[in-house]
Amino acid sequence: MAEKKKKYKFTVMDYVTIGFTAVIVIVMVVFLIKTLKPELFERKNNNNTPAVTQQNDAPATGAPTAEQPTEAPYYSGIGNVYGNMSNDAAAAEADGRTYFVDSEESGSKALKVSNGESERVLVSGEKRISSVCAIKDPFTYADVAGSKAYLVTFIDGEGRICAVTDGPLPSGDDSSVSEEDATVTAKKVIAEGTYRSALSVGGQLYCIDGDGYIVKISLEDAAKTVLSKGRYCALCVYFGSIYAVSQSGDLYLLSTTARPADEADGTDNGSDNSDADGDKYEQLIAHGRYTCIAVFDDWVYAGGPDGFDRYDADKYGRDSLTAAFAPVAVNVDRRGIFFLIAEGTGNGGGTELSLYKATAKNLLSGRAELIGKYAPGISENAPAATSYRITLCSSYAIVSSAEGGEIFKAELGDQNG
């Protein structure tokens, strides 16, 4: 009688060998597919246009901004990164260059540029220059190889939004273009009318017009789009959203997307923004008596006569930081929270200005560091308290009026973020 064949039993090593062989086969299959069909492994991108917050982080840290190759040129960058893309800046920095407002002997204003070694005048003889922004302009000197240029936008003495282009400038150390050959184009008017503030982000300008409405203006064709039904006094653009303070002191979130044509009728809803509450294009975050705003690191800082609050930019949760200080201007970056206090001196109506720096923890305990001060004489008056602005640069802070006049400067040291 034949002996019954024994059934083979798999050992642990058999299972290990089978598993190892399967892994090798899978890796080989993936390698072959990736070689023959590499497009199957590319990350899909449904939005081929540059984000409005492109280059947000690099200028704040002082690190050079990498050139992004594109098939079609476009205006790129944020006009005033220091200051959380806030309005009414007295200066803007880009790749080691500072565009700033200066006073002339005649009392008029000039727009200048400094590369750290020398200065040049871009525009002179203006009654007013405010809302200075500088973004990359790939069009004006497109025919000059190895060059770059900056479109500098500002509001002039007539309230119009204007621009000049600074260039051509060397695009790198090996460029044949010389800094000494840089010129400036003639001043051009982008938008007629009266504007209180303007901020360039990529190919768009976000502005508050003379009536208090927030509008968007295209740099390519000057097309104007009204974004708000309510009226506002201050705004910040932050990662594709607009945070703004209404003329009645409330805090709102606005979309950068245009309303449907049947809703954008330009109806005057007054300054209380009552018709905007609950609107998906214009959402009420909080009621208050705010006069100034800054946004940084997903926090919205709002100040006014009742003190300081901050709101989570995602959930709108509120933190009451302090009621010990009543700021008339605020700005925030990695170095801290900067705010301005205005107090009457009692000697002829002058206003004394004090610039402070603090952390959120400091403010919760009512403490702050004084870093700059302006004390006018008896016959010398600073502008109205609601018109002050703080512009943060890499090594100093500028306190100015909304009209563009520098009041004083406070050195911060060479701290890039």
Image (tube, rainbow, N blue to C red):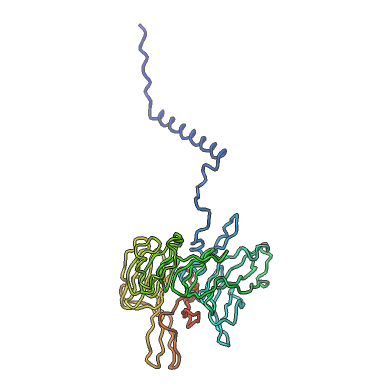
Residue 376 position, x and y percent, is 44, 89
**Is 258 left, or right, of 111 in this rendering?**
left
Specify whether residue 46 is in view.
yes
Number of residue marks: 0
Residue at the farthest top position = 1
- In the picture, measured across the screen, residue 17 lies left or right of residue 42, that is left
**Residue 62: in sight, yes or no?**
no
**Residue 94 % position (x, y):** 55, 69
Closest to the observer: 3 or 268?
268
Q: Position of residue 374 (x, y in %)?
A: 44, 85
Res 9 quadrant in image: top left
Could you tell me which quadrant the N terminus lies in?
Answer: top left
Q: Position of residue 356 (x, y in %)?
A: 40, 78
- Taking 232 as reference, is 13 above or below it? above
Q: Is residue 264 above or below residue 132?
A: above
Give the quarter of the image for residue 176: bottom right
Nearest the viewer among 124 and 414 is 124
Q: Using the image as rendered, state which of residue 262 and residue 297 is in the foreground.
A: 262
Kindly identify the residue that appears in the image at 46 percent across and 72 percent down. 208
